[in-house]
Image (spheres, helix red, strand yellow):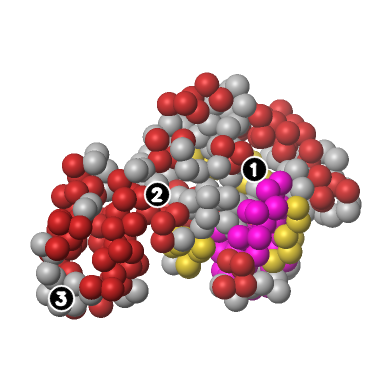
Amino acid sequence: MNDTQFAAATTIREACLQASSFLLEQGVQDHNSAAEWLLQHVLGVSRSEFFMRWNEPFPEECRDRWSEVLTRRAKGEPVQYITGEQEFYGLPFRVTPAVLIPRPETELLVERIVAVGRRLWPDGRPLVADIGCGSGAIPVTIAVQCPSWAVTATDISADAVKVARSNAAANGVGDRVRFYGGDLLEPYIRERITIDILVSNPPYIESGDMPHLQPEVREHEPHLALDGGPDGLRFYRRIVEQTGELPSRPAVIGFEVGSGQARQVAELIRESGGWERIEIVNDLAGIERHVIGSPKI
């Protein structure tokens, strides 16, 4: 958006409407919500305050910053990386290009893991391990929801671990979530740590599909956290195999999976012989999205 277009925007409302039209012209699908979200970010206001100030003059000192963020979104950069934040399970999370943007469907995985854990350890303190924690959305949320549980997490990316640690601190559980740097379960195997609940949202995109992802995902989110190998199942196999190297297999194992992968991942868990009850959980769109292995009780 150029200076001439900005000069025409005299109110916050006009700036938002013009930005929405501009983003639409650039092929941005979420043009309305992106314009609102980015303008709230630039103005430094909440959603409710944003609409209360709808007819106020657009602040002159915000024009350069407003132009910058709109240009970045028009070029395909996700709103979350521009603002540096994403809400997950009602909690604020800092996100950078070093981590995947937390998705709403992963909230259902957390919800199911917490429900199963509370059923199996009603008064206990299970040790949870989130493998490939990224922003820390899963372990931080579990720690907030279950204050008595011991929560740990690992990621091979040192930058991701830094982001996750900062999110744990920001959400008041920095002293209750232990983070390890390392490849999948290797830190737990090395230190002979017994895991009660293993949860993971690993990379699951088939390598051949990577060039066909939406541009904002393909060009901005970390490929390390997306590419799941030739059939998308590389990390599920490795994680399930590595559980056999622990002092004992986790009582509960929970995965998020890609569309069409749930039955194959369920079979991997079944063939391992480590879990008696295997459950497939649909997301809100009806897609088989999560696979949970647990003991029969």
Q: Is the residue under label 2 in contact with that under label 1 (CB below 8 Å)?
A: no
Residue 292 occupies which quadrant of the picture? Answer: top right
Magenta stretch, residue numbers: 137-165
Label 2 environment density (alpha carbons within 10 Å; few <14, some 14–19, many ≥20): many
Residue at the spot 69% in from the left edge and 66% down from the top edge: 177
Number of marks in the image?
A: 3
Residue 119 on image: x %, y %: 62, 60
- The answer to whether marks 1 and 3 mark residues whose Cβ atoms lie closer than 8 Å is no
Q: Element type at marker 2?
A: loop
Q: What element carries label 1?
A: strand
- Which residue in the structure is indicated by mark 1? 293
Relative to 157, is 150 above or below?
Answer: below
Q: Residue at x 58, y 23 (%)?
A: 231
Q: How far apart, in angstroms, are the residues tagged by discs 1 and 3?
A: 56 Å
**Upstream in sequence: badge 2 or badge 3:** 3
Above or below residue 7? Residue 147 is below
Q: Which amino acid does label 3 sit on?
A: Pro
Mark 3: few/some/many CA within 10 Å (<14, 14-19, 20+): some
**Relative to residue 81, is residue 35 drawn left or right?**
left
Q: What residue is at 24 percent from the left and 39 percent from the top? A: 27
Residue 137 visible to an observer of this rendering: yes
Q: In the image, is residue 281 part of the stretch drawn in magenta?
A: no
Circle 1 Cα neighbour tier, 10 Å, few/some/many (<14 / 14–19 / ≥20): many
Label 2: which residue?
78
Q: Residue 293: where, in percent of width, then height?
A: 64, 43
Relative to 109, is 285 on the left or the right? left
Residue occupying the point 41% across, 56% down:
82
Where residue 153 sits, quadrant-wise, is bottom right
Q: Give the mark nearer the N terminus: 1 vs 3.
A: 3
- Residue for badge 3: 57
